[in-house]
Image: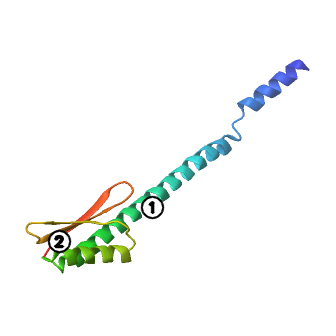
Amino acid sequence: MERFRKSKVARVLRREQGQMLALFAASLVAICGFVGMSVDVGQLVVAATEAQKIADASALAASQDLPNTTTATSTANTYGTKNGSATLATTFEQSNTVVRVERPSTSTTHSSEYSE
């Protein structure tokens, strides 16, 4: 009887049925991880694109008011606020003929530069 049990256990351990289930479960976890990571990276790209759009629109609007830096700064801030940015840094270069608008985001600063 003991011999019968050992041989039956050995046969069960040698069978390859059920391996597909283990491989499927392991690959399903990996696939879910990759999908989750791609969604997160996609959200980061969308946030960076939105920040760049805000900086571009604000700089373009401000460049219309150059060389008057006070009006240009006000216009850039107005466009930034309308498009969802709380903070914008507006600087002027080359004798007030170039405006640079920077919009800081969580990880990087997005800037745009336009001249009159």
Query: Which image quarter is the C terminus in?
Result: bottom left
User: According to the image, label 1 marks what residue?
Assistant: 43
Badge 2, how many Cα within 10 Å: few under 14, some, many 20+? some
Count the marks.
2
User: According to the image, label 2 marks what residue?
Assistant: 114
Q: Amino acid at mark 1?
A: Gln
Q: Position of residue 3 (x, y in %)?
A: 86, 19
The quarter of the picture where residue 93 lies is bottom left
Q: Give the vertical position of 60 relative to 89 (above or below).
A: below
Q: Is residue 97 left or right of residue 70?
A: left
In this rendered view, identify the residue nearer to me: 89 or 52.
89
In this rendered view, identify the residue nearer to me: 55 or 1.
55
Q: Position of residue 5 (x, y in %)?
A: 86, 24
Colour mode of the rendering: rainbow
At 8% across and 68% down in the image, what residue appears? Answer: 95
At 53% across and 54% down in the image, what residue appears? Answer: 36
Element marked by disc 1: helix
Residue projecting furthest to the left: 95
Residue projecting furthest to the top: 2
Q: Position of residue 92 (x, y in %)?
A: 16, 67
Given contact means CB atoms under 8 Å apart, are the residues at marks 1 and 2 in contact? no
Element marked by disc 2: strand
Query: Which image quarter is the N terminus in?
Result: top right
Badge 1, how many Cα within 10 Å: few under 14, some, many 20+? few
Q: Nearer the viewer, mark 1 or mark 2?
A: 2
Cα distance between the residues tagged 1 and 2: 28 Å
Residue projecting furthest to the front: 70
If you read the primary sequence from the N terminus, does the residue marked by circle 1 or circle 2 appear first? 1
Q: Give the vertical position of 50 relative to 24 (above or below).
A: below
Q: Give the vertical position of 22 relative to 109 (above or below).
A: above
The quarter of the picture where residue 20 lies is top right
Q: Amino acid at mark 2?
A: Tyr
